[in-house]
Amino acid sequence: MIRAKKKYGQNFLTDKGVINQIIAAINPSKSEKILEIGPGLGALTIPLLTKVDHIDAVEIDPDMIAALKEKIPPSKITIIPSDILKIDNGQISLYSKVIGNLPYYISSEILLKMTKVINNQKDFHFMLQKEVAERISSKTHSKSYGRLTVMLQYFFDIELLFDIPRESFIPSPNVTSSLVRLTPRHHNFNKVININNFEKLLKIAFAQKRKTLKNNFKNILSDTALRALNINPQDRAEMVSLDDFIKIENYITDKKILE
Ligand code: SAM
């Protein structure tokens, strides 16, 4: 009997109905190149393999890897025994779909890593804590709108598909989960010039969420500069749209303000 390890965020999905719903949402084609993050005991991997020929999977826990090897023949799965955060971004960018019931202790880091791997992927399907799923899909003026929201929404269209109750797992996590679909945005829209500056800017803007932009930006942008961009210095960061953040980044980069 394998014991779930807290340190690896192990909660195993056991509800067959939920598993079928997730597989239907992923909807892979037979020869698609799929990467699964954290296959665990194969709750998603095994049913997915009735739809696709082969899956690559990154798993950190040697006990999970041993169990998977007993359940799934090597012709069907390539197990990459590693920490997902250490996998080269270029390697991940080769997959057309990335999926996973993510280990919640590093879900934000994994999401941020995915912003750096976009190439030709169709989509990403992740199970997350409902609170994180809401945060990344939230709109301006909402309490959960923050750095992660703006960063993720710049790169992806985000759909909150459905919730998954705690009882669908063994052991039950402390919180409700949600399935989200991230689809890379390839259509034309305003572009960030320097993504590092965009990240720095978001960090500064949301450093103290209750303070105004005027206050948080006091070392980098004057009131006059903000007003010239049509942005009210008295607003708080949670009131600023993605397009306005892009505008601020373009200005800052153009004027070499953060260098
Ligand atoms: N997919 C399985 C399921 O749905 O039942 C397990 C999901 S469980 C929430 C998260 C999985 O991610 C576990 O198998 C855990 O060992 C693995 N994991 C945790 N940290 C990891 C990391 N840094 N890199 C890769 N896998 C990791």
Image (tube, helix red, strand yellow):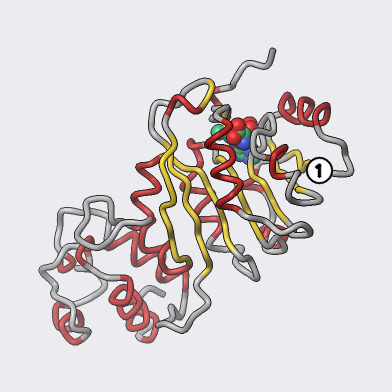
Q: How far across and how far down the image is residue 7, in percent?
A: 55, 26
Residue closest to the eye, 165 or 91: 165
Q: Residue furthest left?
A: 234
Figure check: 23 above or below 122: above
Residue carrying label 1: 77
Q: Specify whether 210 is left or right of 165.
A: left
* Quadrant placement of the C terminus: bottom left
- Asked if the beta carbon under badge 1 is closer than 8 A to the nearest atom of ligand 1, the reply is no
Figure check: 96 above or below 106: below
Residue closest to the eye, 2 or 257: 2
Figure check: 65 above or below 99: above
Identified at 57% across, 63% down, the residue is 116
Q: Residues within 10 Å of mark 1 (few under 14, many from 20)?
A: some
* Quadrant placement of the N terminus: top right
- Where disc 1 sits, the SS reads strand
Q: Specify whether 89 is left or right of 53.
A: left
Q: How far across and how far down the image is residue 8, in percent?
A: 58, 29
Amino acid type for the residue under numbered disc 1: Ile
In which quadrant of the rendered view does residue 29 lie?
bottom right
Q: Specify whether 209 is left or right of 148.
A: left
Q: How far across and how far down the image is residue 45, in percent?
A: 70, 40
Figure check: 217 above or below 211: below
Identified at 15% across, 57% down, the residue is 211
How many marks overall?
1
Q: Specify whether 158 is left or right of 171.
A: left
Q: How far across and how far down the image is residue 21, in percent?
A: 54, 43
| Ligand 1 placement by image quarter | top right
Identified at 18% across, 66% down, the residue is 213
In which quadrant of the rendered view does residue 249 lie?
bottom left
